[in-house]
Image (spheres, helix red, strand yellow):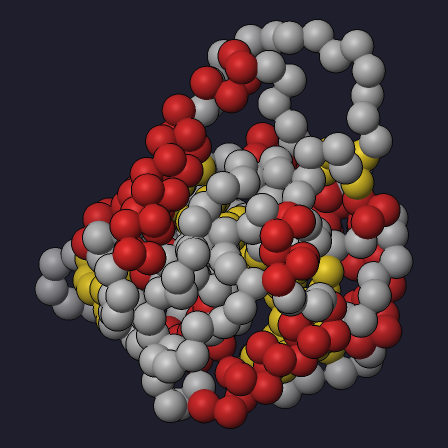
């Protein structure tokens, strides 16, 4: 039974030492964890790679409930810059360890904050240089990962860490196409306008190679490609974090794709879930895509709701803002 705020189950040790530290492997990534301190569910392995398969090298990912990194680590292995947050300090401890184990610590920026504060901190435009410099980890990771992306782009044939196995197969491809086709148009003009991390044309050939021109440019208050909200019991409620948070003046390109996990009971409909999401956002959602992850009980299933963040979430520029020192994290 999981009853605490960090979703960590209570275990009874029947014999032996009370040591629950272990390592697990998923699709070429290694995860170290302590089962007594952090949440982990191996049944979500297929879902982790399904979603990560939709990310492209050089994209910026925001993971609001990152845990020990089941989405963040493979995304970074794929060549993405990942801003990963979790409220559980033990999860962040192991996230940092796993980033080092998998040699992607230069492209994973970890935060231990409330999810709403994390979004505000990450995507709200800094009022002045003092605010920006207060988060040195963000600046360092952005610059390091940008340089790394440039170097990797020069080295043709660089192998990605993520192994999108055949088990994902057509499901992964069709799901990615559904989301991308229904919520965005990716072409050279859009990418050129946005200053996004990837080039406008896809590189043919091996899907596990970095694309040329994969250069990170935008800060998170200028552009984020994907937002992951993997807290199915309450993630819908956290959508209010995106109300009037993004500056229209500074944002480059399309708004991010949001992947919000939720539970749907037998007496609930997808339309009801969309209405809940729209109520939290205070905006209409266009072309939502539902993906069924798994059944969790006879009358309860886990779904992933993907949609483009509505333009109503933009905030118009506010004049006469004054500089202040936030004091950092």
* Residue under the image location 77 percent in, 37 percent down: 248
Q: Position of residue 187 (x, y in %)?
A: 64, 66
* Residue under the image location 22 percent in, 53 percent down: 103
**Side of 55 where 116 appears, left or right:** right
How many numbered marks does the figure carry? Answer: 0
Image quadrant where residue 24 sits: bottom left
* Residue under the image location 46 percent in, 18 percent down: 134
Q: In this picture, is 233 found above or below 175? A: above
**Side of 183 where 43 appears, left or right:** left
Residue situated furthest left in the rendering: 16
224 and 189: which one is in front? 189
Q: Position of residue 78 (x, y in %)?
A: 36, 63
72 and 90: which one is in front? 72
Image quadrant where residue 299 sits: bottom right
Q: In this picture, is 154 found above or below 15? A: above
Q: Position of residue 222 (x, y in %)?
A: 62, 38
Asked if residue 66 shows in the view, the reply is: no
Asked if residue 178 shows in the view, the reply is: yes
Q: In this picture, is 79 found above or below 92? A: below
* Residue under the image location 80 percent in, 44 percent down: 313
Q: Position of residue 273 (x, y in %)?
A: 79, 68
């Amino acid at each position: 039974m999981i009853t605490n705020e960090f979703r960590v189950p209570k275990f009874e040790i029947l014999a032996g030492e009370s040591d629950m530290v272990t390592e697990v492997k998923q699709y070429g990534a290694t995860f170290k964890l302590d089962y007594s301190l952090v949440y982990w569910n191996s049944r979500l392995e297929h879902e982790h790679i399904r979603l990560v398969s939709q990310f492209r090298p050089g994209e910026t990912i925001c993971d609001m409930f990152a845990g020990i990194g089941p989405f963040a680590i493979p995304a970074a292995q794929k060549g993405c810059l990942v801003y990963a947050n979790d409220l559980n300090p033990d999860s962040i401890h192991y996230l940092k360890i796993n980033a080092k184990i998998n040699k992607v610590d230069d492209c994973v920026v970890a935060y231990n904050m409330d999810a709403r504060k994390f979004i505000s901190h990450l995507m709200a435009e800094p009022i002045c240089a003092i605010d920006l410099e207060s988060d040195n980890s963000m600046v360092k990771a952005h610059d390091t990962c940008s340089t790394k992306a440039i170097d990797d782009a020069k080295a043709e044939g660089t192998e990605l860490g993520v192994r999108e196995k055949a088990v994902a197969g057509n499901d992964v491809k069709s799901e990615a196409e559904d989301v991308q086709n229904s919520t965005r148009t990716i072409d050279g003009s859009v990418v050129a306008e946005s200053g996004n991390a990837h080039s406008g044309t896809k590189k043919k050939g091996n899907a596990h190679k970095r694309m040329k021109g994969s250069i990170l440019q935008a800060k998170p208050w200028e552009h984020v490609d994907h937002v992951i909200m993997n807290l199915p019991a309450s993630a819908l409620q956290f959508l209010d974090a995106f109300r009037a948070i993004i500056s229209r003046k500074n944002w480059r390109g399309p708004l991010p794709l949001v992947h919000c996990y939720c539970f749907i009971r037998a007496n609930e409909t997808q339309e009801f879930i969309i209405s809940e999401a729209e109520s939290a956002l205070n905006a209409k959602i266009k072309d939502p895509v539902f993906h069924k992850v798994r059944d969790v009980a006879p009358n309860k299933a886990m779904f992933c709701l993907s949609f483009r963040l509505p333009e109503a979430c933009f905030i118009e520029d506010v004049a006469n803002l004054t500089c202040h020192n936030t004091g950092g994290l």
